[in-house]
Image (cartoon, rainbow, N blue to C red):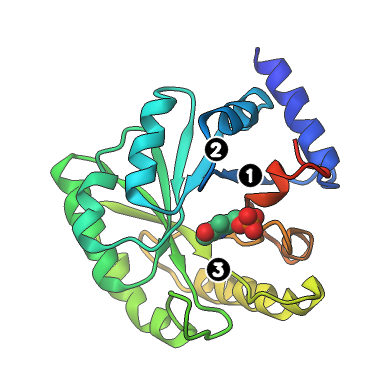
Amino acid sequence: MQETREKNLEQIKERLKIGPEQKIKIVGVTKNRTYEEIERLLNWGLKDLGENRVQELMRKTEWFPRQVSWHYIGHLQRNKVKYVVRIPQLVMVHSVDSLRLAKKISQEAGRVKRKIPILLQVNIAREEQKKGFSNQELREALPAIDSLKNIEVRGLMAMAPFTKDPEETRPFFAGLRELSSEIKEKNWEKINMVELSMGMSQDYQVALEEGATILRLGRILFSDKGGI
Ligand SMILES: *Cc1c(COP(=O)(O)O)cnc(C)c1O
């Protein structure tokens, strides 16, 4: 079973033209997808799935009660944190975009005696319509975040601006990697910078080259051409 899963995963990587030596986690983004579509992904060996709406996450965790590791990747309102931390299959919140949200997650996680792995979302291109810390806001928030007991900071997450040519996203991904290195140099008590969650269907190759450790892929996994 395990062996088949790994073989299938290798095939997915091959189709995505990701070298077998690349250590990378692929999170299959299931927003707007049907049960059958998601089941196909699971049969292909993907284990990590991502949702960007709390309601949807809760619905879909019931569809697949056991085998999935769920990632929350969308904007999270503080009044919904209590639901998210109670989902047993939740393995990571990628989209922590403010100190207030980080505090709330830590507080609610404490109530259910959990420690929740999180990523800090950075608005790398300073886009109006996107959520996330600016680099400077993040630097200023880190000491407070480091003192929160019930979250485990594992790294950074970002979305690149939409561009016609994915190559144009490179400086933004590189910027996120540099920010991560900068944070790593300080001796934080609890903050770890191991994950870089960056790269979506249209720009994942560039993200990989710039050091992504987690890709969040939606459309490309489901499309007819090259999809699965
Ligand atoms: C939808 C979504 C993705 C996946 O996007 P695709 O272009 O379909 O690969 C990744 N990350 C976030 C936060 C999303 O909302």
Instruction: Choose the circle earlier in sequence order: 3 or 1.
Output: 1
Circle 1: residue type: Lys
Q: Which residue is mark 3?
A: 158
Residue at 43% over, 74% down:
131
Q: Which residue is mark 1?
A: 25
Label 2 C-beta lies within 8 Å of the nearest ligand 1 atom: no
The span from disc 2 to disc 1 (Cα, nearest Å) is 8 Å
Circle 3: residue type: Ala
Q: Circle 1: is it few (<14), some (14-19), or many (20+) Cα within 10 Å? A: some
Task: Check if mark 2's residue and mark 1's residue have beta carbons within 8 Å.
Answer: yes
Q: Which residue is mark 2?
A: 48
Decide if residue 20 is in sight here.
no
Residue at 79% over, 40% down:
13
Decide if residue 140 is in sight here.
yes
Instruction: Choose the circle earlier in sequence order: 3 or 2.
Output: 2
Residue at 43% over, 66% down:
120
The span from disc 3 to disc 2 (Cα, nearest Å) is 18 Å
Dot 1 falls on a residue whose secondary structure is strand
Task: Check if mark 3's residue and mark 1's residue have beta carbons within 8 Å.
Answer: no
